[in-house]
């Protein structure tokens, strides 16, 4: 099972959790036990929170011990203060584990830098993929590669945030600085001779792409937004729409029908862009939550 499959399992777990934490815990536990070696820090965190919410204190502590003490993983300090872990708040072993995790996080923050995978032009067209929160550049590459459908004219590269989220994963902040590595990467390749440049973002990565074209000289031919979490719309919708029109950027929006958090934003962006006669298309993906579709759309159909 690959990382993308893990994300899909976690999305299904969230759906099950709406019926109850105990049921969701048993569901994820069974999935984990099938191939435990293929699941990472996020799954163990889910297991701990679900156990905590189901009043299984020993299990909640055990999963964090496995993650932090056994695997050497760590988490962003705030996530270990989640209300689902309230049952562990005064536990001495939990406090010690959190201290170790916090120290590892602080060290990671002190040395972390944004990473742009691009080195040189290797194809006619370029696709720049931007990960979401609790992801990384490798996950973005894996998620977006199917969009080419074997078309060798495309080169895929990734931008990875400088802000650690957890062990091996990163996040974006919705401010006026976090998006800059994305903007700088887009600007770097604009004059490298590519016939077309397309950009794809997942979740928070969508916001970084939209901020990049809105606030800097960054441009491209196409932006594909999958499951867009885009708070930039709240205060900068007019500037964003102006940038899309002025730079003649085609916009393709995809969002799961059951993605309760992102679907309203996706609809809002589509309505505003359509009203301003931007080149925009919007697809609601049935039977899907906050995730990529099982059958990926292709660039041939989007351009």
Image (tube, rainbow, N blue to C red):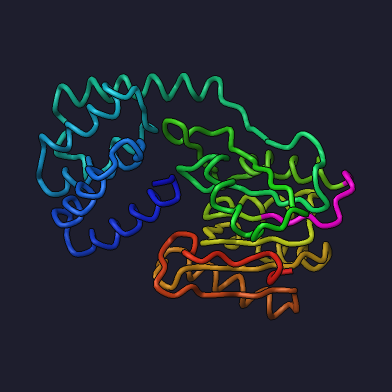
Classify residue 37 as left or right of residue 65.
Answer: right
**150 or 41, nearer to the observer:** 150
Residue 300 highlighted magenta (yes or no)? no
The one nearer the camera, 232 or 41, is 41
Q: Judge whether 78 appears above or below 238 on screen.
A: above
The quadrant holding residue 287 is bottom left
The residue depicted at 37 percent of the width and 32 percent of the height is: 75
**Whether residue 93 is situated above or below residue 31 in the rendered picture:** above
Coordinates of residue 207 in the picture (x, y in percent): 60, 54
| Residue at x-position 49% and y-position 32% | 164
Relative to 293, 299 lies left or right: right
Image coordinates for residue 143, horizontal then vertical, percent: 54, 52
Nearest the viewer among 271 and 115 is: 115
Residue 196 is inside the magenta segment: yes
Residue drawn at x 51%, y 66% as measured from the top left: 295
Q: Is residue 126 above or below residue 230?
A: above
Quadrant of the rendered structure where residue 48 is? Answer: top left
- Rendered-image quadrant of the C terminus: bottom right
The span shown in magenta is 191-199
Q: Position of residue 286 (x, y in %)?
A: 44, 75
Q: Residue, x 71% and y 62% (percent of image)?
A: 240
- Toward which corner of the image does residue 231 lie, by quadrant? bottom right
Residue 25 at x, y = what percent?
Answer: 18, 50
Q: How many marks?
A: 0
């Amino acid at each position: 099972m690959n990382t993308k499959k893990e994300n899909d399992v976690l999305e299904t777990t969230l759906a099950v959790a709406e019926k109850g934490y105990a049921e969701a815990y048993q569901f994820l536990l069974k999935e984990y036990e099938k191939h435990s070696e293929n699941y990472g820090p996020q799954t163990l965190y889910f297991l701990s929170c679900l156990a905590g919410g189901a009043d299984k204190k020993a299990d909640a502590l055990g999963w964090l011990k496995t993650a932090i003490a056994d695997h050497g993983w760590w988490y962003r300090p705030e996530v270990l203060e989640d209300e689902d872990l309230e049952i562990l708040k005064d536990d001495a072993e939990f406090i010690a584990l959190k201290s170790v995790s916090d120290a590892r996080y602080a060290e990671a923050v002190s040395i972390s830098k944004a990473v742009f995978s691009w080195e040189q032009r290797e194809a006619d067209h370029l696709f720049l993929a931007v990960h979401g929160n609790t992801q990384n550049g490798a996950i973005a590459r894996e998620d977006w590669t199917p969009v080419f459908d074997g078309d060798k004219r495309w080169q895929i590269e990734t931008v990875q945030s400088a802000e650690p989220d957890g062990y091996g994963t990163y996040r974006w902040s919705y401010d006026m600085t976090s998006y800059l590595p994305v903007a700088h990467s887009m600007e770097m390749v604009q004059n490298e001779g590519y016939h077309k440049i397309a950009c794809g973002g997942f979740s928070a990565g969508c916001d970084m792409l939209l901020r990049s074209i809105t606030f800097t000289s960054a441009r491209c031919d196409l932006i594909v937004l999958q499951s867009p979490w885009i708070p930039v719309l709240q205060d900068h919708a007019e500037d964003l729409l102006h940038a899309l029109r002025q730079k003649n950027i085609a916009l393709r929006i995809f969002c799961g029908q059951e993605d309760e958090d992102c679907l309203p934003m996706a609809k809002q962006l589509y309505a505003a862009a359509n009203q301003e006669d931007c080149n925009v298309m919007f697809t609601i993906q049935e039977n899907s939550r906050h995730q990529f579709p099982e059958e990926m759309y292709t660039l041939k159909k989007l351009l």
